[in-house]
Image (cartoon, rainbow, N blue to C red):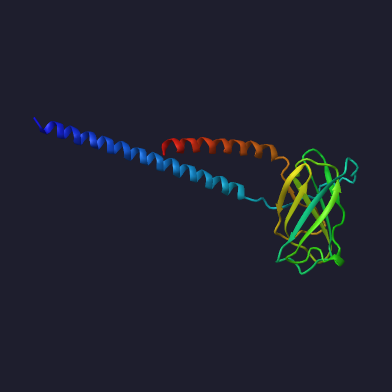
Amino acid sequence: MEANPQFSTSKEGKRKSGFYFSMEMSKASIVFLYFGFVFIHCDAKSIREKPQAFESFNVSYIQNLGSCSYSVVFTTSCSSTTYTRDQISIAFGDAYGNQIYAPRLDDPTSRAFERCSSDTFEIKGPCAYQICYVYLYRTGPDGWKPETVKIYGYNSRAVTFYYDTFIPGDTWYGFNYCNSASSSHRWIGQTSFLFVVLWFVLYALI
């Protein structure tokens, strides 16, 4: 008759230990899911598209729609040519038709675009919103390999375009993220919401 309470206590202890084990497994699963999600999110953001040639790109020569100043920082790759005498042009803008165009940036006397160098240019043009595209144009025999192009604007947060390749001659070459800007903003909002939800679930279980 006295064995039953002992058996019952042992059985209850097993249930408790099983419950705690299940809780620990749930915590571990949530932690694993959270950090896995963070890794996937960071990895997705680190993906960089390659620049593309855009032969049908049209340059706007009308620059009288306002006057704003932009700082454009070029970082030339250490695997570029020692120097270049090529003519370098740039065009960039927003998703609303505002385009900034500089027909010639190169100046051999200033030692611009030399290997492993960084050159900053102040360019004036129409007042644009968020810069979402940039194209470079090169003409000449030397060649040039920019690593990055970073653009600062008054109404735009700084944006960096990653080239790290030689610019082909006599064609506009670069990036256009304007069409994907709205979808990117939605994706960032959704992932931020999921971060918050996962954080609260993790906090409740710990």
**What is the count of numbered marks?**
0
Q: Which residue: 53% across, 36% down?
A: 196
Pick the residue in front: 60 or 126.
Answer: 126
Looking at the image, residue 116 lies above or below residue 192 = below
Looking at the image, residue 198 lies above or below residue 137 = above
Q: Quadrant of residue 74?
A: bottom right
On the rendered structure, is 5 left or right of 21?
A: left
On the rendered structure, is 114 left or right of 40?
A: right
Q: Quadrant of the C terminus?
A: top left
Task: Name the spot of residue 135 as percent of width and height, x first.
Answer: 78, 51
Q: Which residue: 82% across, 55% down?
A: 121
On the rendered structure, is 37 left or right of 78?
A: left
Q: Residue extending furthest bottom?
A: 82
Task: Name the spot of residue 5 as percent of width and height, x first.
Answer: 15, 31
Q: Residue extending furthest left?
A: 1
Q: Which residue: 76% across, 46% down?
A: 133
Task: Name the spot of residue 168 as percent of width and height, x first.
Answer: 77, 59
Q: Which residue: 84% across, 63% down?
A: 86
Task: Name the spot of residue 169 as percent of width and height, x first.
Answer: 80, 59
Q: Residue extending furthest top?
A: 1
Q: Quadrant of residue 21?
A: top left
Q: Quadrant of the N terminus?
A: top left
